[in-house]
Amino acid sequence: MELSANSRGRRRRRIRPWHIGLYVWCGLVFLFLMAPLIVVFPISFSSSAYLQFPPPGWSLRWYTAFIDDTAWIDATVRSLNVAAATTVLSTVLGTMLAFSIVRGKFLGRSMINQISMLPLIVPVIVYSIAVYGLFAQLQLIGNWQAIVLGHTVHAIPFVLILVGAALRTYDVNFEQAAMSLGASRLTAIRRVTLPQIRPALVSAMFLAFISSFDELVVAMFLGGSNMTLPKKMFDNIINAIDPTIAAVSVLQIVLVTGVLIVVSKIGAGASPTA
Amino acid sequence: MNETPSGSPIRATPTGGGGDLTIVGVVRRFGPVTALAGIDLAVRKGEMLTILGPSGSGKTTLLKVVAGFETPDEGDVLLGARTVTFAAPAKRDIGMVFQNYALFPHMTVAQNIAFPLEMRKVAKADAAKRVEDVLRLVDLAGLGGRLPRQLSGGQQQRAALARAIVFGPRLLLLDEPFGALDRKLREQMQLEVRRLQQHLGLTALFVTHDQEEALILSDRIAVMDQGRIIQLGTPQEIYRRPVNRFVAGFIGESNLFRARVAGQGYAALDGGARFRLPADAPPEGTEIGLLLRPERPKPLANGAAADNSFAGSILDVVYLGETVKYRIRLDPGIEIVVRWPFHGSAGSLRKDDRVTLGWSGEDLHLVEWS
């Protein structure tokens, strides 16, 4: 007891006025960012049929409503599938693109880099209409795979930025060492380079996943009757507002937080693989 | 090809004739820059040959050509009798120690060392045993389970060396591997690498810009400048008989004077002083460089004579531990650097003291000036 009191005493610092100001400011920002969550969580457990805050009573009926409605479940599963496929596709393609842009020595390299970044710059609605026109001709509208393709183009810039940055600071000597020890270039990349840029890869995958899982506009244009979760939520809000939407939001938040925790666990630095 | 130059400590390993590594007429250009301007070099079996040169001399490019990371524009690289000019690095059977070691940070030391064995599909149990053996050889027994970052600089170096030799490579390449170590550790590692290389009879090509390191480690040294090999010889030959001004200036400390052969065994220096030349001086009128190593001139006692003797005053004194370095202005207006043992007659000399220096004609070595 004495010891802890001592150490606490030693740690005490003089608090200056601007310190207090800073704490208050940070607190306000935090509150502002968190306010939606503070409202959404209680509403999702509401017993009322309306979006009412504070809720008049508590129940799980909106979660039950979500689980019992196959339309919701279908949309959720479809969204997860689309996001997973987008993650895999954009990570593979984006990583290959990053390798060719960072390591390659061909003409038009920087132009390809610029073009790959365009999806971030072009307004989503413009992009969606363009892709809609193209996919309509190819008769792809209404397939969930079409949404995957649309989302992949959108997710590639994230992968390219993150993996490209990691590759730029990566010491090629490691790869050369692996090759001099008997590895082919591909084996060297798989066994030595990729494990070392894993934090960037994992972050890239996370961003790709989120960018697809949350995406509404592209999915709206390309999905047809195959609704993704954001599209279903959008329709739900337009037609009849009930707290199911809050329950779905909470589940979404929980899922993304879970993914984020996993990401920060496996994405943290290099560690022994075997 | 098998004759051994005098004074060369080459191990008597039987060779099949010719070099173990042979480089024939290798040229490499990068746009308008010629990095390698025709390199011919043969490294004998069991020999440690050092490529010594300043940065930009092309030594790293040459190493990359040998390792397979660069392809020459002209010429060939042979390992034994096999031409490997265009072979992939993985197919060359060369062990390489990189400047920064390039130990894979996500693998343990043992996994790092097992990597080349794994690539060669060596059975797990056999590989584990060989890793153990080589760890013991480089004095890292028991540390196989650690990650590279948990090792000290010297231990990382040993691990990198172990990884490069565990698969019994045809050739060992060392790319300035001691640069990151502090002085004391560096000397220790140099001797250890040398011992190991000789013990295993490894053929090794070592690249460095550090002339001291080259003198310590090598059987032979190839001095490179501007993409060419300027001189190839044993450390003694290179130090005692550099072929030109560049080599003389690059290896060891030196006093270099520009002079013209003046007849009767004398040379006239630019400032007007005359030096007595060694017996094999070139014909009168030839422009030459005179190399005088700092340990050659000796302080002369009163009345003593020498081929060349000059009085002068001491400009600076630098204590280097066992030796002392003096910068002296000789009366004809020439500045020279000399280095003497601290416990000699010179130990008590101070700045501004007067001293008379003497050296024989044979102490001078003649080099091309151009």
Image (cartoon, rainbow, N blue to C red):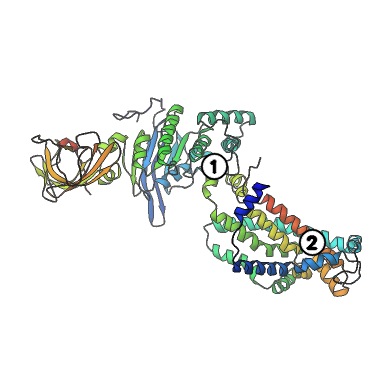
Q: Which residue is mark 2?
A: A252
10 Å crowding of disc 1: few (<14), some (14-19), many (20+): many
Secondary structure at numbered mark 2: helix
Q: Which residue is mark 1?
A: B103
Decide: is B236 above or below A81: above
> Mark 1 belongs to which subunit?
B
Q: CA distance from mark 1 to mark 2?
A: 42 Å
User: In the image, is B333 to the left or to the right of B194?
Assistant: left
Residue under the point 60% across and 44% down: B106
Residue under the point 63% across and 69% down: A21
Disc 1 residue type?
Leu
Kindly identify which numbered label has been placed on residue B125. none
Which is more toward the observer, A53 or A244?
A53
Decide: is A60 above or below B369: below
Task: Estimate the x, y position of residue B28 in percent, counting from the top left.
Answer: 41, 49
Task: Estimate the x, y position of residue B87 in percent, counting from the top left.
Answer: 51, 42
User: In the image, is B227 to the left or to the right of B101?
Assistant: left
Task: Estimate the x, y position of residue A271 in percent, counting from the top left.
Answer: 63, 45
Disc 2 residue type?
Gln
Task: Estimate the x, y position of residue B320 in percent, counting from the top left.
Answer: 30, 40
10 Å crowding of disc 2: few (<14), some (14-19), many (20+): some
Quadrant of res B173: top left
Q: Nearer the viewer, mark 1 or mark 2?
A: 2
User: In the image, is B8 to the left or to the right of B277?
Assistant: right
Residue that sits furthest to the front in the current view: A2
Which is more toward the observer, A152 or B344?
B344
Residue under the point 61% across and 61% down: A161
Which is more toward the observer, A26 or B240?
A26
> Mark 2 belongs to which subunit?
A
Is residue A228 among the parts visible in the rendering?
no
